[in-house]
Image (spheres, helix red, strand yellow):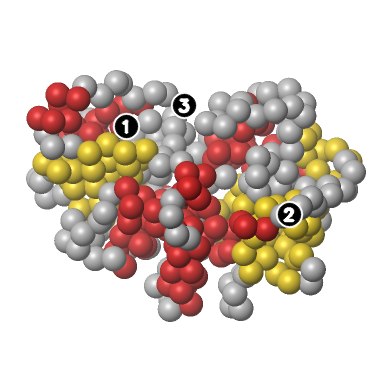
Amino acid sequence: MRAVQVTEFGGPEVLTPVELPDPVAGPGEVLIDVERIGVNYADTHQAENSYLAPSQLPLVPGGEVVGTSDGKRVVALLNGGGGYAEKAVAPQATTIPVPDGIDDLTALSMLVQGTTAWILLRKNSHLEPGESVVVHAAAGGVGTVAVQLAKAWGAGRVIATASSDEKRALALELGADVAIDSRAEDMTAALIEANDGRRVDIVLDMVGGTTTDQSIAALAPFGRLAFYGMAGRENPKPVELRNVLGHSTTISGMWLPHVFRLPGNVFGTALTDLFGLVREGKLKAIPGGEYALSDARGAHEALRSRQTVGKLLLDPGK
């Protein structure tokens, strides 16, 4: 089969098209004929071995695919990679039938990025009606869903940040009340100004570094910052507990694999809810571009340079 393999850790240049033997499903697994592959920011960390879960070489990156298994259309989360290929093996427990009316783009947009936005708002930040929500990287895969969910669930004011006029326009189209430049020198002041002079209740942050530091400083009493990535590849400053106490601040992290350790089927509940909102016309997936499997390097270059919006896909037939 055609696949993309990493034999040494690094940037997009280490993604190499190769021919590999077809994978074989073991107990509790299914073999999927892949139709489209989802590209996530985590894949860029996986390729350079800077992800939360250490990578092992040689590596076929990719954590999500949509395709067919035993004649049924499914979308699946993979275990440790293997998605950048014409065929993939997935745990049966994280292989989900795709409902009628849900296309490949939507299925992949909701599987990781949609459920991430759902969990950030429902479980990390416990959004209440009327609260203000800041969505950093609002034109990205998680951000585009989070903006729509926050509005659908009654946020009082949704503040989007993005790096270009086009991205900010997209965030406004999706329901944000205001969109500001993510490159603002003083993000604390910019967020408070965007919230009509009031400190903000919730911040969803996958940037890291100064953005995180200044976002924490913009939180209102009992404000919550949910941290779920580090696209800027820069650590925020250490948080002093006395400041958390002094401002009644909550700072949480979210890594999607931990959701599967919770009682009940939180992941399944989130995905069902998201698909339902799509069918009701309250939520839509944003296409970010489709790349040939052989050009996975180009997809990673675009993603890392923050040129993209929405959901990026790879076509294993090209």
Residue wearing tag 2? 29
Which of the labelled discs sits on residue 233, or is there none?
3
Q: Which residue corresponds to the image point at 36% horizontal and 50% vertical from the top-left?
A: 120
Q: Residue at x 23, y 43 (%)?
A: 224
Question: How far across and how far down the image is residue 2, in percent?
Answer: 85, 46
| Residue 165 vertical position relative to residue 118 in the rendered view, above or below | above
Q: Quadrant of residue 239?
A: top left
The percent position of residue 259, horizontal first and vertical second, equals: 46, 49
Tell me the crowding category of disc 3: few under 14, some 14 to 19, or many 20 or more residues within 10 angstroms, Cα based.
few
Quarter of the rendering containing residue 234: top left
> Marks 3 and 2: in contact by CB < 8 Å?
no
- Drawn side of residue 1 relative to residue 228, left or right: right
Q: Which residue is the site of mark 1?
A: 211
* Residue type at numbered disc 3: Arg
User: Of residues 45 and 147, which is closer to you in this image?
Assistant: 45
Q: Secondary structure at mark 1?
A: helix
